[in-house]
Amino acid sequence: MKDIAIVAPVYRNAPTLPALVARLRRVLGSEGLSHEIVLIDDACPDGSSETISRLAARDPAIRLVSLDRNVGQHRAILAGLARSDAEWTVVMDADLQDPPEAIPALLAVAREGYSAVFAGRRGRYESRGRLATSRVFKQALHSLCGVPTDAGAFVALDRDLVNELVAVPGGGPSIVAMIGCGGRPLVSVPVLRARRPHGRSAYSSWRRLRSALGALGWVARRRLNGGLR
């Protein structure tokens, strides 16, 4: 079993993948961690699969997971978690907004006894409007299941929690919401998030609203049922 697995869903991120892999290798190598990098091609139309294949040909630590159809960020993450074989797993975006250099700090806190350590989002990484609506959603999610109000999908998970998330029947609409419903020790540490260097978010305003409402409804139902199962 590896020390750590990196799980990153990929959708229209081909331009950022070489830099992401280079930074991950530098950080993980400096920490002396045995590792694997699991990149999930979410039926991406921009040639991401070919880019990942070229990177994997040069680095055996890289694993390509190709999905037959687009399933969205959170289900793509679950597909990657199902293929993770490590003591710790770090989920992060592939667009370079989540800094790989923060991984050692997440792991250091996780080893104090936390099942999940979120990179608490800081900075002006998107528009004021999107930041404001995101805060409203995260406050509501915090009230329902206790996840930190600054939590995003950049998070370090222990082996037991990964196994539990993968075993949830039908998965869930939000990896953050699923973690919150696990009833395990959670915390966040502040991490400065970067602006997107290429392209733009695949989430339109309507899609963000629909995703948020779906996640909140899912959590409410799980609270009635007593947890993830």
Image (tube, helix red, strand yellow):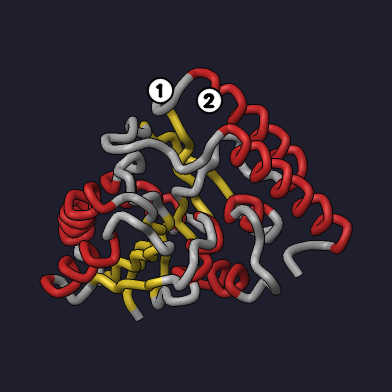
Residue labelled with disc 2 = 131
Q: Identify whether 229 is placed above or below 204.
A: below
- Tell me the quarter of the image containing the C terminus: bottom right
Q: Residue at x 54, y 36 (%)?
A: 204
Q: What element carries label 1?
A: loop
Residue corresponding to mark 1: 124
Depicted 207 relative to depicted 68: above or below: above
Q: How far apart are marks 1 and 2 (CA)?
A: 8 Å
Tell me if 21 is positioned left or right of 113 in this view.
Answer: left
Crowd around label 1: few <14 · some 14–19 · many ≥20 (10 Å): few
Q: Mark 2 and mark 1 in contact (Cβ < 8 Å)?
A: yes
Residue closest to the eye, 30 or 141: 141
Amino acid at the residue labelled 1 = Arg
Viewer-proximal residue among 144 and 54: 54
Res 114 seen here = no
Which comes sooner in the sequence, label 1 or label 2? Answer: 1
